[in-house]
Image (tube, rainbow, N blue to C red):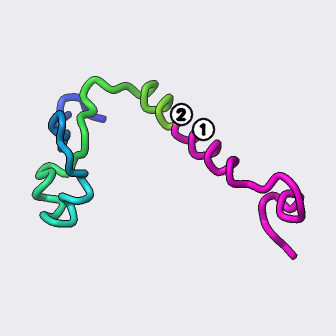
Amino acid sequence: MREDEAAPGYVPEPGERETPVERFIREGFDAVTPNGILGDARGATGELGEAMIAALADAVAARFAEDLPTDGPAASAGGEDRG
């Protein structure tokens, strides 16, 4: 990221009830964030970004692990039902 060009993008107002997706669908992406940025990365660091991605990956993996069967043919096939 070029910090000298960093600018905030769309950041929801406190208490805003509508999701950005609803606004994107209704008004279009440019109407929601004219500069094409979602959020405000000013002050972020590479270390913080790496930590956030690692935490997200761990959360996604844990969620998928909850859905994996623990016994039967699908469990022994690495989650794939080959029968």
Q: Are marks 1 and 2 in contact (CB under 8 Å)?
A: yes
Question: In the rendering, which numbered label is found on residue 28?
Answer: none
Specify whether 26 is left or right of 72: left
Residue interval drawn in magenta: 56-83
Residue 37, horizontal then vertical, whole percent: 22, 46
Specify whether 3 is left or right of 34: right
At 57% across and 46% down in the image, what residue appears? 60
Residue 52, horizontal then vertical, whole percent: 47, 32
Q: Label 1's element?
A: helix
Q: Nearer the viewer, residue 24 or 73?
A: 73
Q: Label 2's element?
A: helix
Q: Quadrant of the N terminus?
A: top left
Would you call the spot at circle 1 few (<14 residues within 10 Å), some (14-19), or many (20 or more)? few
Q: Choose top left, top right, bottom left or bottom right for residue 13.
A: top left
Q: Is residue 27 magenta?
A: no
At 17% across and 42% down in the image, what residue appears? 16
At 14% across and 53% down in the image, what residue appears? 32
| Residue pointed to by mark 1 | 58
Instruction: Please tell me whether residue 10 is drawn above or below residue 2 in the rendered image.
Output: below
At label 1, the amino acid type is: Asp
Residue 41, horizontal then vertical, whole percent: 28, 33
Specify whether 25 is left or right of 47: left
Would you call the spot at circle 2 few (<14 residues within 10 Å), some (14-19), or many (20 or more)? few
Examine the rendering and report whether any part of residue 9 can be seen: no
Q: Marks 1/2: CA distance?
A: 5 Å
At label 2, the amino acid type is: Ala
| Residue pointed to by mark 2 | 55
